[in-house]
């Protein structure tokens, strides 16, 4: 992303403000914002890691007086100490503005009925979707997660036109609606899908079985939440709201910026955030910057659809496995569905990889399909797997994010 004079000035202000927090007061103790005069000066600033934010628990990120904080959000804390993010009134408003812009980019209007399935509470998702819909003037249906039977009943009775969900839960809803043969009673036209990456086969299944146009929405708790970027009708990456954030794409190993168009890790610096400003925050999301103007007319720059996370990769027998590479491999095999799970075990001194994949092929055709998948995996990724076919719907479904790779070696 281009570094303009305006952005550089906003970054200097952000750094100065961030130093009011306990964490950045120490993390940037040797940094004088006035010394940040060029892009090269900015690149000397240290990265911020998620472990840094965990170490700032509970309110070490707070850069304003406590009485200015109107809300707290938090990461799940499933992999360690939760990250607490404080929000001021302005932060909440700015987030809603960005989310409203996401809905507008997806063609949602005040005439729509927005069916919101992500969770509420400390997690940022549900309330973000709701605030943006309400600012737009659409009818928000804050259903929340779970109780799929009730979800579908409300979807039919309230004539929901927009679905907000994780890809995993959107697929589950699509499967249940198809199973019951009630698509003609569903009024959905669009779906805003976020919180996890998903492959092309999964996209097509959701779009076809729900009869919707899909939009990728991007965000993370540390940077407001979902709604800081979204894809448009032309499905060529996600527009990022760069009046609120500055992004870089760096080599995950070296931290050095990659050349334009190369895949790397997304790093974000906030420009206007008051409660918990962040400087060069490593998201661990892997993507690349897309060049040129988008046909939709939006002038905001784009990043490509996420291909995975730098901390999601696993190394087996010298080969690196990303969920995205598995998606791409399975997408090329006829008869294989979008859903899979990989189990990695260490037995008798060897790493053993078992790939379970769903298929519509009858059981008497499993042997041939398993051999095809095994050969394709070997050719594309470089390791031999035990390929095991299962029927559609046999693998677990999730109302939140799906876990694809289970590494049981440690």
Image: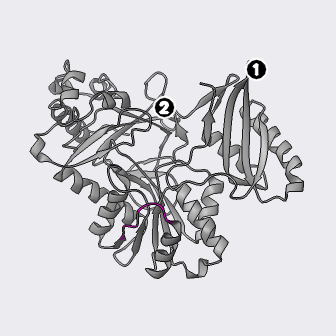
- In the rendered image, the quadrant that contains the N terminus is top left
Q: Which residues are magenta?
A: 141-147
Q: Which residue is label 2 attached to? A: 259
- In the picture, measured across the screen, residue 279 lies left or right of residue 201, that is left
Mark 2: secondary structure: loop
Q: Which residue is label 1 attached to? A: 348
Q: Nearer the viewer, residue 221 or 305?
A: 221
Instruction: Give the quadrant of residue 278.
Output: top left
Can residue 270 be seen from the camera position used here?
A: no
Q: Nearer the viewer, residue 295 or 102?
A: 102
Q: Position of residue 22 (x, y in %)?
A: 18, 28
The relative height of residue 348 versus residue 209 in the rendered view (above or below) is above
Mark 1: secondary structure: loop
Q: Residue at x 71, y 43 (%)?
A: 329
The relative height of residue 33 versus residue 115 in the rendered view (above or below) is above
Q: Residue at x 30, y 27 (%)?
A: 55
């Amino acid at each position: 992303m281009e570094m303009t004079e305006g952005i550089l000035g906003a970054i200097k202000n952000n750094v100065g403000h961030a130093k009011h927090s306990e964490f950045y007061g120490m993390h940037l103790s040797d940094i004088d914002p006035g010394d940040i005069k060029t892009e090269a000066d900015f690149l000397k600033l240290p990265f911020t890691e998620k472990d840094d934010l965990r170490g700032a628990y509970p309110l070490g990120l707070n850069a304003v007086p406590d009485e200015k904080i109107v809300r707290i959000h938090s990461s799940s804390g499933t992999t360690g100490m939760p990250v607490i993010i404080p929000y001021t009134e302005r932060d909440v408003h700015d987030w809603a503005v960005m989310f409203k812009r996401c809905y507008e980019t997806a063609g949602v209007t005040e005439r729509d009925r927005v069916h919101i399935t992500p969770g509420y509470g400390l997690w940022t998702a549900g309330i973000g979707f709701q605030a943006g819909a309400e600012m737009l003037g659409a009818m928000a249906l804050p259903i929340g997660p779970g109780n799929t039977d009730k979800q579908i009943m409300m979807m039919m009775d309230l004539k929901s036109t927009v679905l907000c969900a994780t890809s995993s839960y959107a697929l589950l809803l699509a499967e249940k609606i198809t199973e019951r043969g009630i698509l003609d009673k569903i009024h959905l036209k669009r779906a805003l899908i976020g919180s996890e990456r998903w492959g092309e086969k999964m996209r097509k299944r959701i779009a076809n079985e729900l009869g919707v146009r899909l939009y990728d929405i991007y965000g993370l708790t540390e940077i407001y939440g979902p709604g800081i970027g979204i894809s448009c009708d032309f499905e060529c990456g996600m527009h990022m709201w760069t009046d609120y954030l500055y992004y870089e794409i760096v080599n995950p190993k070296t931290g050095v910026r990659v050349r334009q168009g190369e895949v790397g890790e997304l790093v974000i610096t906030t420009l206007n955030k008051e409660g918990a400003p962040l400087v060069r925050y490593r998201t661990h999301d892997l993507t690349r910057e897309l060049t040129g103007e988008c046909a939709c007319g939006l002038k905001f720059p784009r990043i490509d659809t996420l291909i995975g996370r730098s901390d999601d990769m696993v190394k087996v027998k010298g080969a690196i496995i990303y969920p995205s590479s598995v998606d791409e491999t399975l997408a090329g095999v006829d008869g294989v569905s979008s859903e899979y799970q990989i189990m990695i075990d260490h037995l008798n001194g060897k790493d053993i990889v078992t790939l379970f994949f769903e298929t519509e092929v009858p059981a008497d055709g499993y042997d041939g399909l398993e051999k095809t998948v095994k050969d394709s995996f070997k050719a594309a990724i470089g390791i031999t797997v035990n390929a095991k076919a299962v029927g559609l719907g046999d693998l677990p479904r999730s109302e939140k994010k799906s876990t694809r790779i289970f590494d049981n070696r440690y």
